[in-house]
Amino acid sequence: MSKIKFGTDGWRAVVGKDFNEENVAIVSKAIGKYVFDNYGIYKTIIVGYDPRNMAKEFSMQCAEILKNVGFKVLYSDKVLPTPVLAFNAKKLDACAVMFTASHNPPEYLGIKFIPDYAGPATSEITDEIVANFGKDVPSCVKGKLIYTDFSNAYFKHIKEIIDFEKIKDNLDKSHIIFDGLYAASIGYFDKLLNEKNIKFDSIRMYHDPNFGGGMPEPKPQFMGEMIDYIKAHKNYIGFANDGDSDRFGVVNENGEYVTPNEIIAILLKHLKKNKKMSGCLVKTVGASLMLDIVAEKLGVEVVETPVGFKHVGEAMREYDPIIAGEESGGLSIQGHIPEKDGILANLLVLEAMAYEGKSLVQLQKELKKFAGCEFINTRVDKKLEKVSEVKPVLEKFGIMDEVIGQKVSKKDFKDGVKLYLEDGTTWILVRPSGTEPLLRIYIESDSQDKIDSIVNFVK
C-alpha cells in the first residue's frame, strides 16, 4: 500500500510489480469511498481503458468492485481515449475511472480518476482518495454493470465544434497522414475523418500493448516512420497521439516537428480571429514566453498555472478561456472539457489551415513574424541522491541574482523557482518532479548560445 503514490495525473506503476490485483483493489475501493462520501451511492461511475497490457483486465476488476459495493457502473465496450471518457463524465454527470499510463513506457499502467466536471482530479481529491486506502463503502444497495459505447456522444460533440466541411473544402493542396502509433485514438480520429469523407493516409493502425517496441509518445524520435513518409511525399502534414490520446504530435510539410507552444499560439490566433472566441489564455509556468507575446498582441489576458493539466483544468473551470495548454502537448478549448484532448488538437490544426487557406509551414512563418522573435526551449533533468536534497537546491536557485552574466529581473515561486533574466527573452524554471529525487529544469531563450551557456551552468 505504501508504494501507491498519486502524481500530477493519477497513479502509475509497472504491471506485475506495484500495479497488481491487490493494489488495484485498494485504489478502486478508495475511489468508491470517495464517490460515496461526496456524491452518494447513486452516483454513476464510468470505467474505461487504453490499449496497454492488462488494462482491460484490471479495469474490469475495478468495475466489478464498484458494482459489488452498490454503484451503477457503465463499462466501456472497447478501447477508448481519455478525453472520450472525460467528455462522457460531463455529459452523464458521472465520475470516471480511466486505466492508462498515458505516454509512459509499455510496462506501465495507471489509474486516473476524473470527477464529474470532466477534468483531472485536484490534489485535494487525490489526497482524500489516498486517505481512504483500506476503507470500505458502507452500502447495502445492489449495483449493476452495463457495457457502454461512449464514442457516439463524443463524436456528436466534436462535429459541433469543428468545421469539418471547411476542412474538406479547403485542404485541396494539403494531404494528411495519421500515425496511429498503436494508440487509443485509432478508431476515433480516423473515424471522424472517414465519416466526413476527408481523405488521409495512415500507418501503424492497430492496437499493440507494446507500442511496436517504442514509446507511446508523439515526439520526433518515436514518429520517425511518419516523418520519413512526409519527406518522401509532397504537401503532407502528419498527426499522432500518445497512448491514451490526450496529447498531440504534429509534423509539418517539411517533415519537421511542430512544438506544442507553436500549436497553441497558432490556434489562439485562429480561434480569436476565425471563430470569434473571447476570453483569456491559460498556460503553465513552463510554457513559452511567445504565448504571452502573442496573447498581448491579440489583446488576450494570460492566466499562468503550475505545471500539470490538473492546474490548467482547474483554471479552465474558473476562467472559461479561449484555449488552455501546456508545453508537453496537451490542450483544450472553450466549449469543450477541462481535460487535454489530443484528437481535438489535431483537428483544430486542420481547421486553422482550412480557414486561412495556408499550409502549416506558412502559419508557422506568420506566427514568428507576428511574435517578432523565435524562442528555443530545452529541458534538463537532474537526478539527486535523495529527496531531502531537493529543497536546498531550490533555495539556492531562489536567492540567485545573476545567471550567465545577466541579472535576474524577476522571480516566480508558484511551481518551484522561475528566474527571468534581464534580456526579456530568457528564463529558467527549476521544479521538483513530485514522485522521485529529480529536478526538472526548463530553459527558454531566443539564442542557442544562451541556451547552451545555461545548460552548462545548471549542470
Image (tube, rainbow, N blue to C red):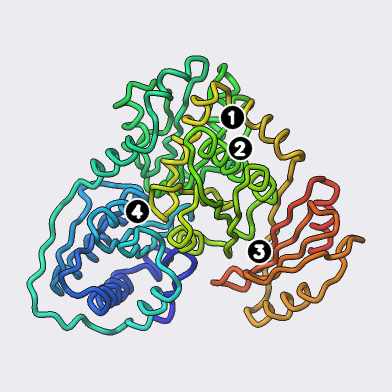
Q: Check whether the beta carbons of the residues at disc 1 and disc 2 lie within 8 A of each other.
A: yes
In whole angstroms, how far apart are the C-alphas of marks 2 and 3? 22 Å
The residue at which mark 1 appears reads as 252
Whether residue 365 can be seen here:
yes
User: Judging from the image, what secondary structure is the residue with disc 2 in?
Assistant: strand
- Residue holding disc 4: 53
Viewer-proximal residue, 146 or 422? 422
Residue 258, disc = 2
In the rendered image, the vertical position of residue 29 relative to residue 290, given as above or below: below
Q: Residue at x 48, y 69 (%)?
A: 7
Label 3 with label 4: CB-CB less than 8 Å = no
Image coords of residue 434 (percent x, y)? 56, 72
- Of the numbered discs 1 and 2, the one sitting upstream in the chain is 1
Q: Amino acid at mark 3?
A: Arg
Q: Amino acid at mark 1?
A: Asn
- C-alpha gap between disc 3 and disc 4: 29 Å
Other-residue count near label 2 (Cα within 10 Å), few / some / many at <14 / 14–19 / ≥20 = some
Helix, strand or loop for disc 4? loop
